[in-house]
Image (spheres, rainbow, N blue to C red):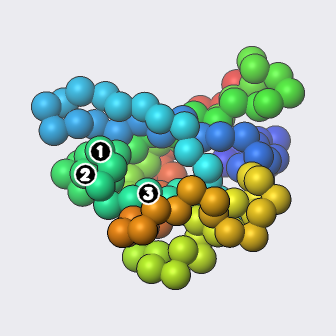
């Protein structure tokens, strides 16, 4: 589904801008760190965030990843949340801190944060550039 010419964006340190649908139908977009395993795109959220609540209500999602070296080259992914996995030991967010910051541990963890991993199954893509 994802053209080989754009897989580099999925393994890069680019941020994914994630769009969800709020409870009144309003869109919400925020940048996130993400991981790609060849089938699923994953990102971390705390259970108190609006994006988490939006996805629990409506699992449809869109993501846009812009090439850091060429802002006219991008990958858009539309799909749905296939799973929401608990991350009590923060293994996933720590792996993202390693990818994006070069640090072994996520530095902004707050006591009481309950982290989950949002697992996205791509269903449609648009590539440009």
The residue most toward the left is: 24
The label on residue 45 is 3
Residue at mark 1 to residue at mark 3: CA–CA distance: 9 Å
Residue at mark 2 to residue at mark 3: CA–CA distance: 10 Å
Label 2 environment density (alpha carbons within 10 Å; few <14, some 14–19, many ≥20):
some
Tell me if 124 is positioned left or right of 101 in this view: left
Give 120 or 84, whichever is nearer the viewer.
Answer: 84
Q: Residue at x 46, y 62 (%)?
A: 110
Q: Residue at x 33, y 49 (%)?
A: 49
Picture coordinates of residue 121 (x, y %)?
48, 58
The residue most toward the right is: 69
Q: Which residue is mark 1?
A: 50
Q: Which residue is mark 2?
A: 53
Picture coordinates of residue 63 (x, y %)?
52, 39
Q: Secondary structure at mark 1?
A: helix
Tell me if 34 is positioned left or right of 62 in this view: right
Give 115 or 107, whichever is nearer the viewer.
Answer: 107
Label 1 environment density (alpha carbons within 10 Å; few <14, some 14–19, many ≥20):
some
Residue 80 visible from this viewpoint: yes
Q: Residue at x 63, y 63 (%)?
A: 106
Whether residue 94 is situated above or below residue 42 in the rendered picture: below
Picture coordinates of residue 26 (x, y %)?
23, 27
Q: Tell me which label, 1 or 3, sits earlier in the chain.
A: 3
The C terminus - image quarter: top right
Residue 76 visible from this viewpoint: no
Q: Secondary structure at mark 3?
A: strand
Label 3 environment density (alpha carbons within 10 Å; few <14, some 14–19, many ≥20):
many
């Amino acid at each position: 589904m994802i053209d080989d010419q754009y897989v580099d964006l999925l393994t890069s340190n680019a941020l994914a801008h994630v769009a969800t649908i709020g409870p009144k139908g309003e869109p919400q977009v925020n940048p996130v760190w993400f991981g790609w395993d060849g089938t699923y795109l994953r990102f971390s959220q705390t259970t108190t965030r609006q994006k988490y609540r939006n996805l629990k209500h409506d699992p449809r999602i869109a993501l846009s990843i812009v090439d850091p070296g060429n802002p006219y080259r991008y990958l858009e992914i539309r799909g749905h949340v296939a799973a929401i996995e608990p991350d009590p030991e923060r293994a996933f967010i720590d792996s993202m801190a390693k990818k994006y910051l070069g640090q072994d541990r996520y530095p902004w963890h707050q006591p009481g944060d309950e982290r989950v991993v949002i697992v996205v199954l791509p269903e449609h893509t648009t590539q440009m550039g």
